[in-house]
Image (tube, grey):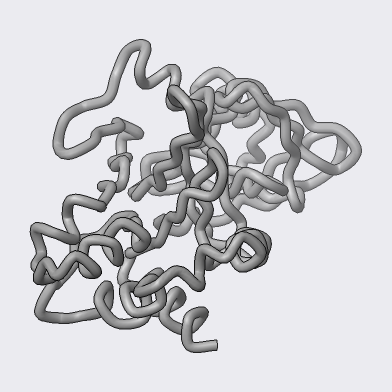
């Protein structure tokens, strides 16, 4: 119980825990991941609970936002090394940042070209944490990194309206559909849809233009196939 509460407190501080289990990074805040980690005994390793429940919450260490690896941190403590910010930071991943213009960066360095295309093709959404993430196989194991976003990084490249739902082809190559027939628009006239499994999705320019052809004169609704679809103000991420 204390472990779960600590994980939730860390999440509120935008700090997450990753533990390598097999060849995959698991986050114990997720129920399925926690069950797997408990089964394999990783949460019982000496000092891991103390790192999660105390050290990563210590105000004097002031760990930055991002992802942490408690197993090697606990191992360092076991050798007698004093736990200082520089020790914790050796086992820390920064978030991938996505700004309001959907520009990606890591450690203040822009991500573009083939690397951006690669990351976008491995982009996904975690319902439990409400975070977008990139996960891909690197060398001998899977790597994973959460995103910190000012706007959704998920883009609908094409959109169709069928059986009272929008269906979308996304920039990660997957398909999804909306939870409900509602379009959201922000003050820059960018359009968004709420998907079943990929969070909020921004419409690329081409599908946005096609959708807005169905805009009523009032500007408050779309009419597609005789059905009225409300337009709501998009909320910030």
Question: Above or below — where is 35 with respect to 127?
Answer: below
Picture residue at 64% right of the left edge, 29% below the top: 211
| Identity of the residue drawn at 48% across and 27% down | 140
The image quarter in which residue 52 lies: bottom left
Q: Residue furthest right?
A: 163
Q: Which residue appears at 45% of the width and 40% of the height?
A: 144
Q: Position of residue 163 (x, y in %)?
A: 90, 38
Say whether residue 128 is left or right of residue 85.
right
Q: Quadrant of residue 174?
A: top right
> Looking at the image, which is closer to me, 56 or 218?
56
Identity of the residue furthest to the front in this view? 79
Numbered-mark total: 0
Asked if 84 appears above or below 213 in the picture, the reply is below
Q: Is residue 135 left or right of residue 63?
A: right
* Horizontal arrangement in the rendering, residue 56 relative to residue 6 (left or right): left
Percent of width and height locating residue 28: 53, 64
Percent from the top left, x then y, of residue 17? 40, 61
Query: Does 64 appear above or below 143?
Result: below
Q: Residue at x 35, y 34 (%)?
A: 102
Which image quadrant is residue 66 in?
A: bottom left
């Amino acid at each position: 119980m204390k472990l779960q509460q600590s994980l939730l407190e860390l999440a509120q501080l935008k700090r997450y825990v990753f533990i390598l289990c097999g060849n995959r990074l698991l986050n114990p805040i997720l129920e399925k991941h926690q069950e797997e980690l408990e089964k394999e005994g990783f949460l019982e390793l000496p000092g891991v609970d103390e790192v999660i429940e105390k050290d990563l919450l210590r105000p004097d260490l002031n760990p930055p936002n991002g992802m942490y690896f408690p197993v090697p941190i606990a191992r360092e403590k076991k050798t007698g090394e004093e736990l200082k910010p520089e020790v914790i930071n050796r086992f820390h991943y920064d978030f991938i940042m996505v700004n309001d213009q959907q520009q990606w960066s890591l450690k203040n360095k822009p991500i573009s070209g083939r690397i951006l295309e690669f990351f976008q093709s491995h982009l996904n959404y975690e319902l439990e944490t409400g975070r977008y993430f990139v996960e891909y196989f690197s060398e001998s194991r899977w790597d994973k990194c959460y995103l910190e976003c000012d706007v959704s990084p998920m883009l609908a490249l094409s959109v169709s309206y069928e059986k009272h739902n929008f269906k979308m082809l996304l920039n990660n190559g997957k398909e999804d559909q909306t939870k409900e027939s509602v379009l959201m628009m922000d003050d820059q006239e960018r359009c968004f849809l709420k998907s079943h499994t990929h969070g909020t999705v921004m419409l690329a320019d081409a599908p946005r233009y096609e959708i807005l052809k169905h805009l009523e004169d009032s500007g408050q609704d779309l009419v597609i196939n005789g059905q009225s679809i409300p337009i709501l103000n998009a909320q910030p991420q």
